[in-house]
Amino acid sequence: MQKVVFLFLISFLVSLAAALVVLKILRKLRVGQAILHHVELHKQKSGTPTMGGFIFILPTLVLLPFVLNRDTPMSLIVILASVGYAILGFLDDFIKVRTGKNLGLRAYQKIIGQGGIAILVAVFAYMINPEGRLFIPFANIFIDIGFFIAPLVFVALVAATNSVNLTDGLDGLAASVSFIYLFFLGAIMLILSSQNLVPEIDAFLQIASISCGALMCFLLFNTNKAAVFMGDTGSLYLGSLIALLSLFSYLGLFLIVLGIMFVVSSISDILQVAYFKYSRRKTGEGKRIFLMAPLHHHLEKKGWAEARIVWLYSAITILVGMVCVLSLI
């Protein structure tokens, strides 16, 4: 426990130092975010530095020697795969900055990149967990699903990265929900660590602690009005890290429960697109369920302030997190 707290504090300080350097570099290079033309409420944010995800990615890499050793191969895969997604996000951000448009990698390029990494991780997950062990929330039991753990890892990893990316639409939203998710995931890991049922759970807990410290620092610069955006560099990294820490610690189903607001972002976006296409095919005129998707943009269109929406998403995640933890005690 002392090491977990120590890593949290050190991560915050390292992130603070990284933020000062990263912000200076981004401003000097004029790495500004282009805003989509249909997001009228965010026009004033155009030019805000992006790729700020480096602020919470770098501390994790710097502090890895405190966590990884010969007995933590799964933790190494978690970090390597997350960095792989960060690189994919960086390429997307770089193209947007280079062209001055909010259009980076093409859809098929993102799918190939995300899917390729997910396949490799899924194969590795099956190799180290052939029984397909999985923890069932609230029932508090482990079940074995065998080979099906591989497709579950693939789907969960791709879904989580895109869900966090979709949630990253307001100042501080994705970072706040991610911080709370990792905090409660760490609490769940801490409770289960005494049972010695999950390999490397102590290392996973330490990575979660480092990430929480880094995200807390990042929020100093990302809450409204944001001085920097995490960009796809940060959102793809966060989504993959959250998914991998959950899946490799057998807690993958908490992605649906504890990550409920990420799920809401994806479902609202999917429903919007599906209904628009369906109604256009039926009537010739596309109709929408929401004023704008994902849901946080709908609330914004309804007149909600960004800070209020962030608080709503955070409060719901906190309440669900408390229920999850209490169910284990």
Image (spheres, rainbow, N blue to C red):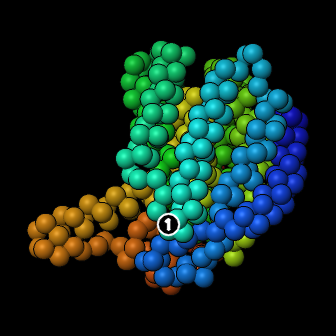
The structure residue drawn at horizontal position 63% and vertical position 74%, both measured from the top left corner, is 47
Q: Quadrant of residue 76?
A: top right
Image: 23 above or below 85 = below
Asked whether 320 or 166 is in front, the reply is: 166
The structure residue drawn at horizontal position 22% and vertical position 64%, both measured from the top left corner, is 277
Asked whether the viewer can see residue 61, the reply is yes
Asked whether the viewer can see residue 143, the reply is no
Percent coordinates x, y for residue 82 in the rendering: 61, 38
Q: Name the residue under label 1.
A: 102
Percent coordinates x, y for residue 21 in the rendering: 83, 57
Quarter of the image with the C terminus in it: top right
Percent coordinates x, y for residue 1 in the rendering: 84, 35
The structure residue drawn at horizontal position 30% and vertical position 63%, both measured from the top left corner, is 273
Percent coordinates x, y for residue 161 in the rendering: 51, 47
Left or right: where does residue 9 sit relative to residue 154?
right
Left or right: where does residue 147 sit relative to residue 125?
left
Amino acid type indicated by mark 1: Asn
